[in-house]
Image (cartoon, rainbow, N blue to C red):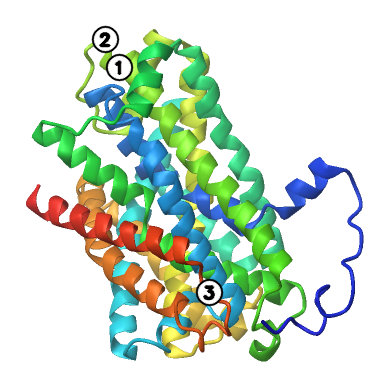
């Protein structure tokens, strides 16, 4: 492994970091935590809520199983970005035909835009429930506002805002305790997996897997590694290539914490809705707003408020990752100037994709497209795309030439291969369902 000339491994011991162990730990957290938290977007919250309402705690074990799979995939994408100095689409083109990668970028844009539309609907419903204003106003306000901030703010500010928005997700943990679940049943269903026997149960299992491991997270994670490098002054590709051992260890901690937190939130949302809605017989919940309204008499106003504010907060976190990941994919395929640190005039095509995805997401809410149906189609596209992308990720991460001798470990490759097989089975199940 060839360390960078400016790295601690090439020039002596690393300089001491100011502050105590806790401050140093939080300083490590970055792209991994943001990417993990972005996975719990409003559409994901809806899926977890419906799962808890319909099936109770029966599928809690999925939160435990998907954590290592999600962590392995994200870390492999992070390693690709750190070692190659490129985003995922750029690295994939060194192993796969360019047309194939471009087709994947187009499918990603379609799925992400459908997801943006559904997320805006969820956020607008939540805000309308709090204020009584028309939800259409909030769809436009959130959609346009997020797009403008993504285009105008530089990467360091965006990264800082996204990291602070992660805190909103703790509301779901508090809400679960306020619901007073039967912890013995919760622990049993967490550690003793039970395969769903009903058609609805199998559909929800497929939906949970597809919601937790989504293609946009692959592209966002690797591209944020490149942004971190640029923010550190490594603007040229040749300087960004390669990663030190300490950098990889730090990112592994970051990704581990982010994916653990993502699955923890998933766990507690299912617990909350299982304890309140399922137990009281309210199993036909279709949207997050319905779940929030139904929670009020069962878990109290505070739990309902935390649930509703959480939907808005994670939407603000997730939508930039959805629109941004598609922009990164297209930019690397078509060799556009790219990056959230670029001014609009210098990266117009890149930001045009961000704006187009946001605008189309807003329009979906005014042309009669049902948000739930949009989520279904988004899940179908993602379910078909994910296995192929994971195979491409594996090929790149295993290539010693592309990875400069810093290929992923055998354990990581096995976990990602298992994830690809699981996602292929999920895609087949989704189409069949």
Q: Quadrant of residue 379?
A: bottom left
Q: Secondary structure at mark 2?
A: loop
Q: Secondary structure at mark 1?
A: helix
Residue 397: x %, y % from top left = 46, 75
Q: Residues within 10 Å of mark 2 (few under 14, many from 20)?
A: few
Query: Nearer the N terminus, badge 2 or badge 3?
Result: 3
Q: Are marks 3 and 1 in contact (CB under 8 Å)?
A: no
Q: Residues within 10 Å of mark 3 (few under 14, many from 20)?
A: many
Q: Residues within 10 Å of mark 1 (few under 14, many from 20)?
A: many
Cα distance between the residues tagged 2 and 3: 48 Å
Res 293 seen here: no
Cα distance between the residues tagged 3 and 1: 43 Å
Residue under numbered circle 1 = 277
Residue 225: x %, y % from top left = 61, 69
Query: Nearer the N terminus, badge 3 or badge 1?
Result: 3
Residue under numbered circle 2 = 280
Q: Residue at x 68, y 52 (%)?
A: 29
Residue 366: x %, y % from top left = 27, 52
């Amino acid at each position: 492994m060839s360390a960078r000339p400016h790295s601690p491994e090439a020039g002596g011991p690393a300089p001491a970091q100011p502050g105590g162990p806790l401050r140093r730990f939080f300083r490590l957290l970055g792209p991994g935590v943001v990417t993990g938290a972005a996975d719990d977007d409003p559409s994901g919250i809806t899926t977890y809520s419906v799962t808890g309402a319909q099936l109770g705690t029966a599928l809690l074990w999925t939160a435990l199983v998907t954590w290592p799979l999600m962590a392995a995939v994200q870390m492999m994408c992070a390693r690709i970005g750190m070692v190659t100095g490129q985003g995922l689409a750029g690295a994939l083109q060194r192993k796969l035909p360019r047309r194939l990668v471009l087709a994947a970028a187009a499918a990603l844009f379609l799925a992400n835009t459908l997801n943006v539309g559904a997320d805006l609907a969820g956020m607008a419903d939540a805000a309308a429930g709090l204020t009584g204003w028309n939800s259409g106003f909030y769809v436009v306000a959130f959609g346009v506002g997020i797009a403008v901030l993504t285009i105008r703010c530089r990467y360091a500010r965006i990264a800082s805002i996204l990291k602070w928005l992660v805190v909103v997700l703790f509301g779901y943990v508090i809400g679960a305790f306020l619901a007073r679940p039967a912890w013995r049943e919760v622990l049993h269903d967490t550690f003793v997996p039970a395969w769903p026997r009903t058609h609805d149960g199998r559909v929800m299992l497929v939906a949970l897997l597809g919601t937790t491991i989504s293609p946009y997270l692959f592209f966002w994670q690797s591209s944020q590694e490149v942004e971190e490098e640029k923010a550190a002054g490594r603007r040229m590709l040749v300087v960004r290539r390669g990663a030190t051992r300490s950098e990889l260890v730090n990112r592994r901690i970051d990704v581990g914490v982010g994916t653990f937190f993502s699955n923890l939130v998933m766990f507690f949302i299912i617990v909350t809705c299982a304890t309140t809605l399922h137990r009281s017989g309210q199993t036909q919940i279709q949207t997050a707003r319905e779940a929030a309204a139904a929670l009020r008499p069962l878990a109290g106003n505070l739990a309902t408020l935390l649930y509703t504010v959480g939907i808005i907060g994670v939407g603000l976190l997730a939508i930039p990752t959805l629109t941004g990941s598609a922009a990164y994919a297209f930019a690397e395929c078509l060799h556009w100037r790219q990056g959230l640190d670029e001014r609009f005039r210098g990266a117009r095509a890149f930001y045009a994709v961000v704006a187009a995805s946001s605008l189309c997401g807003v329009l979906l809410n005014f042309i009669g497209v049902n948000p739930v149906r949009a989520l279904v189609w988004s899940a179908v596209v993602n379910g078909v795309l994910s296995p192929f992308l994971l195979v491409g990720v594996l090929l790149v991460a295993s290539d010693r030439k592309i990875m400069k001798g810093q290929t992923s470990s055998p354990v990581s490759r096995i976990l990602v291969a298992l994830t690809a097989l699981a996602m292929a089975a999920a895609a087949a199940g989704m189409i069949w369902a």
